[in-house]
Amino acid sequence: MATILQYLVYGLQLGSVYALLALGYTMVYGIVGMINTAHGDFLMIGALGTYFIAKLFDSMSIDGTYPMLAVGCIILIATVMTGGIAVGVEAIAYRPLRNKPRMIALITAVGVSMFLTNFPRALPFIGPNPRPFPTLFTPKTFNVLGASITSTQIIMIVLAAVTMLALDRLVAKTKIGAQMRAVSMDKDAASLMGINIDKVISITFFIGGALAAVSGICYASVYPQVEVYMGSWLGNMSFVSAVLGGIGDIRGAMLGGFILGIAQIFATAINSTFGYAVGFIILIVILLVKPAGIMGKVTIEKV
Amino acid sequence: MKTTNAKTMHPLLRKFGPLLGCIVFYVVIMLLRKADIINGYYMQVMLFAGVNVLMTASLNLVNGFTGQFCIGHAGFMSLGAYGAAVITTMVFKSNSIPEAAQIPVFLLGLLCGGIVAAIVGALIGIPSLKLKGDYLAIVTLAFGEIVRALLRLIQPIGGARGMIGIPNYANFFWIMLFVVLTLWLLRNLIYSSYGRAFIAIRDNEIAADAMGINTTKYKIMSFCIAAFIAGVAGGLYAHVLSFIQPDSFGFVKSADYLVYLYAGGSGSLTGSVVGAVLLTILPEVLRFLATWRLVLYAIILIAVMLYRSEGLIGGKEVPFLRIKRSSLYEQPLFGRKKNGLSEE
């Protein structure tokens, strides 16, 4: 029982990383209609950026731990920076291709992903070597029914849940949310209604990039190592969770992320390779049963 | 598309020119290899370029001509590679087969690899191609990763360590033969009534359906043929490198083929050849840049997509890979062509 509960905690922890990243995937897909394969690299940039920003704040640290204010500043700067990079990538690489076939944008995204991975790798002061991630949160361990849970894990899980709710409300209730929904339904009609499409898409990318940075910080806080390749497989898995929950749907991304995280941890306990494959097997089963994903709606194409 | 060159070309030359060109190309390469102007490393790059042409052309059939999105093509390649390697290395114990039997065993291996890939292609194609939309993309992505994970689990074929000691039967002759054969086959397929059905589905699936084309059947057919070719290409790859590993057929590899396809120009066999050959050679040429190599490669790729998003070739074909519709109606192998039926 205690073991199962412990695995569940690990599953929720991994799931919240997937979920935060999947939110960005699903929003970009829902609004622009492209699979942004470079999204996983935003996570890497967020985590790596945090490492270097934390170095700048080194003078404020006491025994390797930072005061709350510094932690807040580090996270804020890293998040805004990654969001800014995401907006820049969209403006330079994706915007000119918006009216081209979608596969073209996918190939460009592959190129962007390659660039975002290899550029830091080639820079002499970053390089390919893994680095230890600084301790931003000092973990306190609690004991719940025999399973140990740290404060970092609680922060992560709560943060993911709160972000999801906030984002869901943002899209459902605010003006920018209404604009986002309008653009995702029909770009041309939205444009005729006076919605600045470029602005809406930029904001979407900013939110996606910022959430990727947050999930990168979360991931690196519990698996304290950052390197330039960390984005690719996390990106893949969170794409799977976005599809699992129904791509384009915010609650679906969240649900998919947690399902995938928990399934993966339990499967890894059986066999480490199987743990990697289980996500894809669940994906195929779900797609065969319900092609649009758990929360997705099937759209009927009209002539 | 009116090229005076192709119009005035002698029909005999039109018919046998490409074959002659291939033979001359082969002989020249072999002479250069003898004279050691082309060293082993260049040869290796050329062999990989050939395998990549096969992969890209087969992907082109699905993505470029039928308009479906397969983004896990390396999965079929790995099935073919393992299928062929198991036949040549394990079933027939490669080091104990006599000289004369090597080639038949090798071809049998390639055939088995292709068939395995085609069967699996049908298994995943049938449920996902019945639906319209992006499902094939997502299912093939998942399929590629599942195959990789499962191959890692099977210990008799080396598990995650991979399979070693595969005989390197695939020399330049075989690679070239298969490239020429595949391109010829694909050209004829694309200009047959099947190919027209594929293109109709690509251009407008609903309209094709309304015209009485069984879209599901043709989509599955195109997908299986592509899987078969990818399987054969995988078999060749295994017998070039003589070492295969599940991790070398991951999403990165599939993405490579997508890049070759779309950078060269989808919907054009010439584009596939140009894209695959150029982009196989480019990273090798850039090797002097050390770690900046892939950065520059990425920038070139993004620039090509931004400024020439239809691909380098952009849907055009060289005359040999294009059948003039007029030549379908008249067959004067010896003698002048009539000017009665001209294309367009």
Image: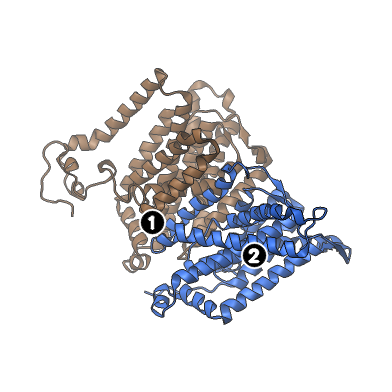
Between A159 and A59, the one nearer to me in the picture: A59
| Chain of the residue that carries numbered disc 2 in the rendered image | A
* Quarter of the figure with residue A295: bottom right
Between B151 and B38, the one nearer to me in the picture: B38
Kindly state the secondary structure of the residue where label 1 is placed. Answer: loop
In the rendered structure, find residue A13 and report the number of the disc placed on it: none
* Quarter of the figure with residue B29: top left
Name the residue located 48 percent from the left edge and 61 percent from the top edge.
A90
**Mark 2 Cα shell of 10 Å, populated few (<14), some (14-19), many (≥20):** many
Between B317 and B222, the one nearer to me in the picture: B317
- In this rendering, which labeled residue sits more in front, label 1 or label 2? 2
Please tell me whether residue A219 is drawn above or below residue B34 in the rendered image.
below
Please tell me whether residue A283 is drawn above or below residue B10 in the rendered image.
below
In the rendered structure, find residue A20 and report the number of the disc placed on it: 2
Q: Position of residue A283 (x, y in %)?
A: 60, 61
Name the residue located 53 percent from the left edge and 77 percent from the top edge.
A176
| Chain of the residue that carries numbered disc 1 in the rendered image | B
Name the residue located 43 percent from the left edge and 60 percent from the top edge.
A102
Left or right of B119: which side holds B191?
Answer: left
| Same chain assignment for discs 1 and 2 | no
Quickly name the residue at label 1.
Answer: B66
Kindly state the secondary structure of the residue where label 2 is placed. Answer: helix
Left or right of B72: which side holds B331?
Answer: left
Q: Quadrant of the C terminus of chain A?
A: bottom left
